[in-house]
Image (cartoon, rainbow, N blue to C red):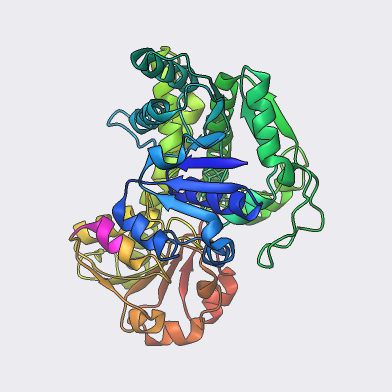
């Protein structure tokens, strides 16, 4: 099929590469000249495991252009994958989605049928609004036009985006008309039936079952995307709330999570206590859901609480650090003047994304309290430096150099490299071997045996 994708962010680019791999003819549109320059050179503007190899593999079958008019008229299916950034009040801003729809409608051929698919995460009712925008443009152009609008929410997990795209749990389509559902079924046929040869970097998991394609109405499709993210966010916040109580009563949250996760109704995933969630989705989507609710004068105390617990975790970690200094160095000792090493800046491993990353808040707080902060991340240091915008941080390429004569280490992101650190060597060269493990990466006894004053979360 001939596909046009508007937007080459995480969702747009991943989708474009995968659909091109599945032998569709894909053209992706973006206005960002820097991104386009990289893409024209065959380079990925985002860090995502495997994406560069796949870009190389699909080569020129995937085209990139700044011009909607150059690709949309000939396309059968158009996917909108532009950003929906948060407004000041938390609601999602759908301006770019509407603008994309407008630009598409302006160049649609009057006598051809198109399926216009909203992939961006959007507030409930956006599909209806997109259909209105298209009709308004057609009315201005004095043409009838023939566009079916559908919702196809994306469940991409950064760091695992391509794995998730080739082997999805489900594909959700929200549409009122059969031709849009049919077009999307044809688009995803190779995934639904798993008829493609898996790329070498992404072999088909052994226990993988064919994914269902769920069809529903557009509003329910829009709603279920927010509901899915909010549910996962609150599952994490729930275990973090339990973690806090575990500390008070002398229980171990990792054992509690293991035990409740064995209940198939609960399941073991997303029960890792720690610094909680960041990234581009949970913070934004839970706020947007509350924005949608506020418009209907509807209270959502569970969602509110999930957010409150999540952001409290960042303060909890700094509090653990304050308490560790008091414990190890004396009641009057504070963070002021201490040298603190931050391990991990990305909001999670395998991405260079630092949006809403816990590390940024923690660093700002430590600097405000007068600490010297050193920071390390395998790939996210440039993005963190930009996001921290002048905050005094000493970025170090090497964890051992970072820890030299440091007073404490705070592990913020559970990158693989941090699992393999030589704890004994680290502890030895620190001025004060304090380790605050914000992701429960280490076994407390191992860290203590290596010489650390160790504090985890909920254990
Ligand atoms: C999420 C959803 O998973 C995805 O379906 C949706 O489309 C976008 O939002 P993403 O933000 O990439 O994806 O990350 P995810 O892997 O879900 O993790 C989010 C955050 O939760 C990370 O900061 C991670 O560290 C944290 N997390 C995750 C925990 O703190 N504990 C856990 O048990 C799991």
Percent x, y of residue 210 = 79, 44
Look at the image and say whether residue 456 sits in the magenta stretch.
no
360 sits left or right of 21 in the view? left
Percent x, y of residue 180 = 63, 25
Identified at 75% across, 36% down, the residue is 212
Decide if residue 393 is in sight here: yes
Identified at 38% across, 46% down, the residue is 30
Magenta: main secondary structure equals helix
| Magenta highlight range | 384-389
Identified at 66% across, 49% down, the residue is 269
Q: Locate residue 232: give its quadrant.
A: top right
Q: Locate residue 310: give its quadrant.
A: top left
Percent x, y of residue 42 = 45, 65
Q: Quadrant of the N terminus?
A: top right
Look at the image and say whether residue 386 sits in the magenta stretch.
yes
Identified at 48% across, 30% down, the residue is 303
Q: Tell which of 444 and 425 is nearer to you.
A: 425
Q: Quadrant of the C terminus?
A: bottom right
169 up-or-down from 348: above or below: above
Percent x, y of residue 144 = 47, 13
């Amino acid at each position: 099929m001939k596909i046009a994708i508007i937007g080459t962010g995480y969702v747009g680019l991943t989708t474009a590469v995968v659909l091109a791999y599945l032998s569709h003819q894909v053209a992706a549109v973006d206005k960002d000249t820097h991104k386009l320059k990289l893409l024209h050179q065959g380079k990925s503007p985002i860090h995502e495991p495997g994406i560069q190899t796949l870009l190389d593999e699909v080569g020129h079958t995937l085209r990139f252009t700044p011009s909607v008019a150059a690709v949309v008229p000939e396309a059968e299916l158009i996917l909108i994958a532009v950003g929906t950034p948060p407004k000041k009040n938390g609601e999602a801003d759908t301006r770019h989605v509407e603008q994309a729809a407008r630009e598409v409608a302006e160049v649609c051929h009057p006598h051809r049928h198109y399926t216009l698919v909203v992939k961006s995460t959007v507030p409930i009712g956006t599909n209806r609004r997109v259909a209105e925008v298209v009709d308004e443009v057609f009315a201005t152009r004095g043409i009838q036009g023939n566009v079916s609008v559908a919702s196809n929410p994306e469940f991409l997990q950064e760091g695992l985006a391509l794995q998730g795209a080739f082997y999805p749990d489900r594909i959700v389509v929200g549409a009122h008309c059969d031709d849009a559902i049919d077009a999307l079924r044809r688009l995803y046929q190779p995934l639904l039936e798993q008829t493609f040869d898996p790329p070498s970097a992404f072999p088909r998991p052994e226990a993988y079952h064919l994914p269902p394609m769920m069809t529903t109405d557009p509003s329910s499709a829009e709603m279920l995307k927010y509901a899915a993210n909010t549910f996962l966010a609150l599952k994490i916040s729930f275990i973090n709330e339990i973690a806090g109580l575990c500390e008070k009563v002398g229980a171990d949250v990792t054992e509690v999570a293991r035990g409740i996760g064995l209940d198939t109704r609960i399941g073991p995933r997303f029960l890792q206590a720690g610094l909680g969630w960041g990234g581009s989705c949970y913070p934004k989507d839970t706020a947007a859901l509350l924005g949608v609710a506020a418009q209907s004068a509807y209270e959502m105390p569970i969602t509110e609480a999930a957010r409150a617990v999540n952001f409290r975790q960042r303060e909890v970690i700094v509090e653990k650090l304050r308490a560790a200094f008091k414990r190890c160095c004396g009641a009057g000792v504070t963070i002021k003047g201490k040298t603190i090493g931050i391990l991990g800046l990305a909001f999670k491993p395998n991405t260079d994304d630092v949006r809403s990353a816990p590390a940024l808040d923690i660093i700002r707080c430590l600097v405000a309290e007068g600490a010297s902060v050193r920071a390390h991340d395998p790939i996210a240091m440039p993005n963190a430096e930009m996001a921290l915008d002048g905050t005094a941080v000493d970025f170090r390429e090497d964890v051992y150099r970072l820890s030299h004569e440091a007073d404490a280490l705070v592990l913020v992101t559970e990158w693989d490299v941090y699992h393999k650190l030589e704890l004994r060597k680290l502890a030895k060269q620190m001025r004060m071997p304090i380790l605050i493990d914000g992701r429960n990466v280490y076994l407390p006894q191992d860290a203590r045996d290596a010489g650390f004053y160790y504090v985890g979360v909920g254990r």
